[in-house]
Image: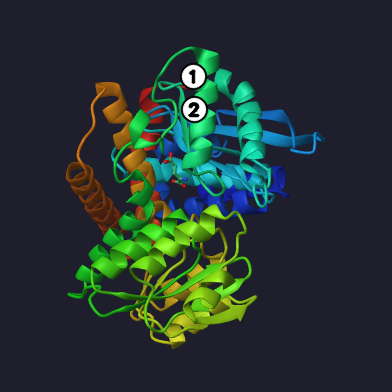
Amino acid sequence: MNAYVKRVAENLQSKYPWEKEFLQAATEVLESLSPVMDKEPKYEKYGILERIVEPERIIIFRVPWKDDKGNHNVNIGFRVQFNSAIGPYKGGIRFHPSVNLSILKFLGFEQIFKNSLTGLPMGGGKGGSDFDPRGKSDNEIMSFCQSFMTELFRHIGNDTDVPAGDIGVGAREIGYLFGQYKRLANEFTGVLTGKNVKWGGSLIRPEATGFGVVYFTQEMLKTKGDSLKNKTVAISGFGNVAWGAATKATELGAKVVTISGPDGYVYDKDGIAGEKIDYMLEMRSSGRDKVQDYADKFGAEFHAGKRPWEVKVDIALPCATQNEVNGDDARNLIKNGCICMTEGSNMSSTPEAIEAFLNNAEKIMFSPGKASNAGGVATSGLEMSQNSMRYSWTEEEVDAKLQQIMKNIHKACLDASEKYSKKGNYVDGANIAGFLKVADSMIEQGLV
Ligand code: 2IT
């Protein structure tokens, strides 16, 4: 490994030993950059690696709110403004009890490279709260969102930082957050993306992450002269990303046989299509956060407490959360003849799983989330453009731009992997292609 990379990685590990997820994300990127540092000494000269692993700013705040019984509650709110070299901070907000600074730093860090890969002018950021939306009433969600935005609004803006949704934050939450921002700032502006189309949202934004995952899969398969037609697909999760991926994969002739939730996974041998895909939305909006309801309703198999990676499929699309595919899962997928693993969630795979995939590159192709799930934030970028123009593109226009962006990302990853690593290593390709534009922009803007 390059000595500069090693020094920065070790320093980071001793500085933040408790930030497990952040160290995992940062170490992966730093290792990918080793051949770049060997060839280009300017990055060491300008201290780019030390700078890029530290957020420009972190905001942490108290979020007091009242539940329906009149009890007072307090949660923690965060916004990690990681890097603004190529545009305003951009990235989602996550509401989940597991949220802490390590998770938001990992997500914000990944977002820097992902946003760079889209080719659109967006910096990297992420925010959220340890608030648990499960079982909360609509009124409680609104009360929480309003309190969260009452502090956050002074730190964001359409030219400063533009949040969006993530786990636990969908169209409803974006509505309450936007309403409160508008009230406090007294301006109607594109300060959040993922808005309803009636008030400034973009067509295709709800579908975009999942569609992008499938478009990227299509590009990967094309390099082997293959397609999605008649392939079986395992999807995990049942939220926004899983829903979009199931819709597009089915449309392109594949058969989706699994979805999953915190309670286990559903195996539907007949394929999850049509009204069964719509039912995912119903399960999501119920706020119960479980998928057994699907098995009960449609008579499919339910495997309690398990993940879908034990099913024999051609393609795996993890669309739930970080580290949802471990080394054993990866070896299982490979053993069962899976030929393509495209991450829909951020950092779906553990380092051990990634190692297994890369060591079996002749059997399985692997793409990291920061490349293959970039369609969501890319379409957020298109929403920002439409808001700035005060204009809306049609569904066909947005979808065509999204497809082109996913193709461009795929090509950028392949080209960078060929130049610096091994052609087809999408992990190195994504990290390097995403890094170069941000790093050069940082040098050009001086010591900031
Ligand atoms: O992880 C992600 O890229 C997102 N949650 C979407 C971020 C965005 O700003 O649309």
Tell me: 195 left or right of 18.
left
Q: Which mark is residue 178?
A: 2
Mark 2: give few (<14), some (14-19) or many (20+) Cα within 10 Å. Answer: many
Residue closer to the observer: 203 or 61: 203
Task: Find residue 121 and report its image quarter.
Answer: top left
Tell me: 299 left or right of 362.
right
Q: How is the image coloured?
A: rainbow
On screen, 249 above or below 304?
above
Asked if residue 125 shows in the view, the reply is: no
Residue 378, position in %: x, y?
Answer: 33, 42
Q: Which mark is residue 182?
A: 1
Q: Which mark is residue 229?
A: none
Residue 198, position in %: x, y?
Answer: 34, 32
Q: Secondary structure at mark 1?
A: helix
Q: Secondary structure at mark 2?
A: helix
The amino acid type, in three-letter code, at marker 1 is: Lys
Tell me: 221 left or right of 279.
left
Mark 1: give few (<14), some (14-19) or many (20+) Cα within 10 Å. Answer: some
The residue that appears at 52% across and 60% down in the rendered structure is 283
The residue that appears at 68% across and 30% down in the rendered structure is 60
Residue closer to the observer: 72 or 334: 72
View quadrant of ligand 1 = top left
The amino acid type, in three-letter code, at marker 2 is: Phe
